């Protein structure tokens, strides 16, 4: 029996947790649990993204549960890794989507296993090469500042279509304004007659799964760009996978992890400034050949199987499990006083052990 949680409305939980659980349900009994739900029947518990409390982890370890953590992109700054160092050390295994993140976590836990995101958005058939057409950018509003800045520096000769979560503009407006101002770009905003938004000269459409599918089918090529930051460098390569494994010519920043991920598989992703190669038929054909060879590894049944393969390794008899420090006179209870007292003692013991 396998447990997945904590259940929440984040797309990442549905993608990495719920969808995989449903696939595994063909062969295993599945249980979903809520945040800080202490009593869980399953002996194997997958913790997707949201870090639980130390008290919760300690409670599950006392019951000899196997705990697997899947951080995805949970850590946005170095201080958060330090903050959760003790929690990280107690997991029996950590599944990572980005080896750069693994390099930072391994000082706290060396039981690391790479997994792919499965290809959630897949076209029914590979596209044909297009001499003309539009270039596609899809991403969250938090990355729009990078897109706008890049297009100011590197104008592209083909029209561009942009899909984003415009419904969240009220929450990102101030941060976008500040970020663009730092790059010398004044904030402008206009609601267009067609319902789209024009932000600093870039027309943006509301994302939907249907519109994304249509544009993936129709576009000539796609690209991505992000500012160089701790959080962005630790993102999984999901966006690049979505385009490349659907046979769409893709370009992005050379320093990104996505570029590194595909380079290790033998594919060099061009920078968006290299339009002659990025938009060429030769690169298009290379993408088709690459996708035909490697796409199977990101199909949901392959990714779900990798969860079980890594779990088998973790549960081998000769595999060393993290041990809880002996703490006499205290048990996890559901009162605030006992939990606080326990956490203080656990942290003291484990920090000594880590040192």
Image (cartoon, grey):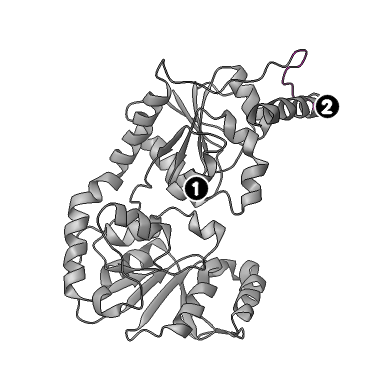
On screen, 346 above or below 190? above
Predominant SS of the magenta segment: loop
User: 84 and 104: which one is in front?
Assistant: 104
Q: Give the mark toward the camera: 2 or 1.
A: 1
Q: Residue at x 47, y 32 (%)?
A: 111
Q: Quadrant of the N terminus?
A: top left
Tell me whether the residue at label 2 lies in contact with that at label 1, contact meaning CB atoms closer than 8 angstroms.
Answer: no
Q: Position of residue 167 (x, y in %)?
A: 56, 67
Using the rendered view, name the quadrant where residue 314 is placed.
top left
Q: Is residue 331 magenta?
A: yes
Location of residue 240 in the rendering, given as x and y in whole percent from the top left corner? 35, 60
Compared to residue 326, the image places residue 85 above or below, namely below
If you read the primary sequence from the N terminus, does the residue marked by circle 2 or circle 1 appear first?
A: 1
Q: Quadrant of the C terminus?
A: top right
Count of numbered badges drawn on the protein? 2
Identify the residue position indicated by label 2 in the image. 337
**Is residue 282 in sight in this rendering?**
yes
In this rendering, the answer to whether 71 lies above or below 92 is below
**Distance Cα–Cα, label 2 vs label 1:** 35 Å
Residues 196 and 42: in front is: 42
Look at 33% across and 51% down and name the residue there: 119
Q: Secondary structure at mark 2?
A: helix
Kindly identify the residue that appears in the image at 46 percent across and 46 percent down.
Answer: 14
Image quadrant where residue 242 sits: bottom left
| Mark 2 Cα-neighbour bin, 10 Å: few <14, some 14–19, many ≥20 | few
Numbered mark located on residue 101 in the image:
1
Q: Position of residue 54 (x, y in %)?
A: 67, 31
66 left or right of 292 in image:
right
- Element marked by disc 1: helix
The residue segment tinted magenta is 328-335
Badge 1 crowding class, 10 Å Cα cut-off, few under 14, some 14 to 19, many 20 or more, is many
Q: Image check: 324 left or right of 282?
A: right
């Amino acid at each position: 029996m396998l447990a997945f949680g904590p259940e929440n409305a984040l797309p990442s939980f549905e993608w990495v947790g719920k969808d995989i659980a449903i696939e595994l349900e063909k062969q295993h009994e599945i249980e979903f649990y809520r945040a800080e739900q202490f009593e869980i029947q399953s002996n194997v518990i997958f913790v997707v993204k949201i870090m639980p409390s130390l008290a919760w982890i300690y409670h599950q370890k006392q019951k000899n549960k196997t705990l697997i953590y899947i951080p995805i992109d949970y850590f946005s700054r170095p201080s958060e890794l330090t903050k959760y160092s003790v929690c990280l050390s107690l997991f029996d295994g950590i599944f990572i989507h980005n080896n750069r993140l693994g390099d930072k976590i391994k000082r706290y836990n060396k039981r690391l296993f790479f997994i792919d995101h499965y290809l959630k958005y897949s076209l029914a058939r590979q596209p044909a090469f297009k001499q003309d057409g539009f270039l596609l950018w899809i991403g969250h509003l938090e990355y729009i500042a990078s897109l706008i800045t890049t297009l100011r520096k590197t104008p592209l000769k083909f029209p561009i279509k942009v899909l984003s979560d415009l419904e969240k503009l009220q929450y990102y407006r101030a941060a976008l304004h500040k970020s663009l101002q730092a790059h010398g770009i004044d904030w402008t905003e206009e609601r267009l007659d067609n319902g789209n938004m024009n932000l600093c000269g870039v027309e943006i459409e509301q994302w939907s799964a249907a519109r994304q599918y249509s544009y993936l089918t129709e576009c000539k090529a796609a690209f991505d760009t992000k500012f160089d930051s701790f959080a962005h460098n630790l993102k999984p390569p999901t966006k690049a996978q979505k385009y490349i494994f659907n046979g769409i010519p893709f370009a992005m920043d050379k320093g990104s992890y996505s570029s590194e991920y595909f380079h290790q598989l033998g594919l060099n992703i061009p920078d968006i400034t290299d339009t002659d190669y990025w938009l060429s038929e030769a690169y298009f054909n290379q993408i088709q050949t690459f996708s035909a060879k490697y796409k199977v590894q990101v199909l949901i049944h392959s990714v779900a199987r990798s969860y079980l393969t890594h779990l088998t390794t973790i549960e081998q008899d000769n595999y060393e499990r993290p041990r809880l420090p002996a703490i006499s006179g205290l048990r996890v209870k559901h009162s605030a006083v006992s939990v606080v007292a326990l956490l203080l003692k656990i942290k003291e013991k484990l920090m000594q052990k880590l040192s």
